Image: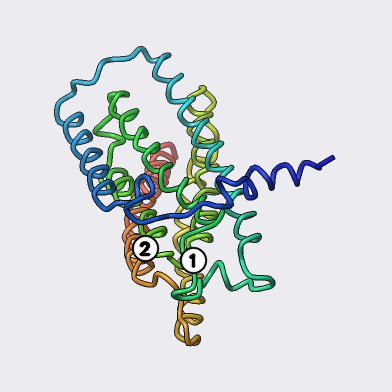
Amino acid sequence: MDGPYSTLHYWLVDHPTIKEFEWKQGTTFGSSAFFLTLTVIIYLTLTFTFHSFPILPSLRPTTLRLITAVHNLILCFLSFIMAVGCTLSTLTQMPQNDWTWPICFPSNRTPPTGPTFFWAYIFYFSKTLEFIDTFLILLSGSRSRRLSFLHVYHHSVVIVMCYLWLSTSQTLFPVALVTNASVHVVMYGYYLLSALGHRPWWKRLVTDLQIIQFVFSFGISGLMLYYHFSRSSGCSGILGWCFNAVFNASLLLLFVDFHSKNYANKRKERHDDNDKQS
């Protein structure tokens, strides 16, 4: 009888749909530049329309909290599955004892096939599911407080990044996928508990983890660049990685700004209150 690990490995790595996955540019569903462009345009158009013209139906607070809780539960669970699935798939697909493979795919010798790329494909489509985050904010009626440029920018550009992972066989994406999905487990877990009326104490931890994730990505990218320039073959998808690096740098700046405005100001307010009391 197969043990729990064997069963898990089959459903997350060895199932034929996962193991035999192949990204064919322009053939696989969602693999065309037209699909990507249309998806981003529709998201931005709907966001701008519903933000500028509050025509979305009003929902009862209990109904909105229930929808929000279900949405966050789905994304929390999906993020966990993607993190585990990509980890197991990477360990299975990489050449034997070549621990540099997840960091530097050999250039021109790493087609977007196999279980690791399957989870990149699932991750790519999970970003369209995250668009619902925006519309839940709009439905909540707190647009001026919560719907920020950072939120819309992140949601509209991250799907482009995921598309490039697949279309360029971008090196280093397994590390980025696992770290990002792991952070999202914490983030959507927080949102889930908040929607259920149990706001955890670790809200700031979510932002801190996101900043740490970006800093880590730059650190591991340094190692990737060492492999890229020290090996004759170089690393696959380096142009896609350049887009990824610029995007992560912009997000890091925006998250640091968000962090300082939200938490530094709160500390200053508490300090001022203490001064008044004393």
Question: Residue under circle 2?
Answer: 244
SS of the residue at dot 1?
loop
Type of amino acid under label 2: Asn
Q: Quadrant of the C terminus?
A: top left
Q: Quadrant of the N terminus?
A: top right
Pick the front one: 120 or 77: 120
Tell me if 138 is positioned left or right of 94 in this view: left
Residue 120 has which mark?
A: none
Question: Residue 83, relative to residue 61: is it above or below?
Answer: below
Q: Residue furthest right?
A: 1
The answer to whether the residue labelled 1 contacts the one labelled 2, judged by CB atoms less than 8 Å apart, is: yes
**Few, some or many residues within 10 Å of mark 1 (<14, 14–19, 20+):** many
**Few, some or many residues within 10 Å of mark 2 (<14, 14–19, 20+):** many
Question: Residue under circle 1?
Answer: 172
Q: Earlier in the sequence, mark 1 or mark 2?
A: 1
Quadrant location of residue 241?
bottom left
The Cα atoms of the two marked residues, 1 and 2, are separated by 10 Å
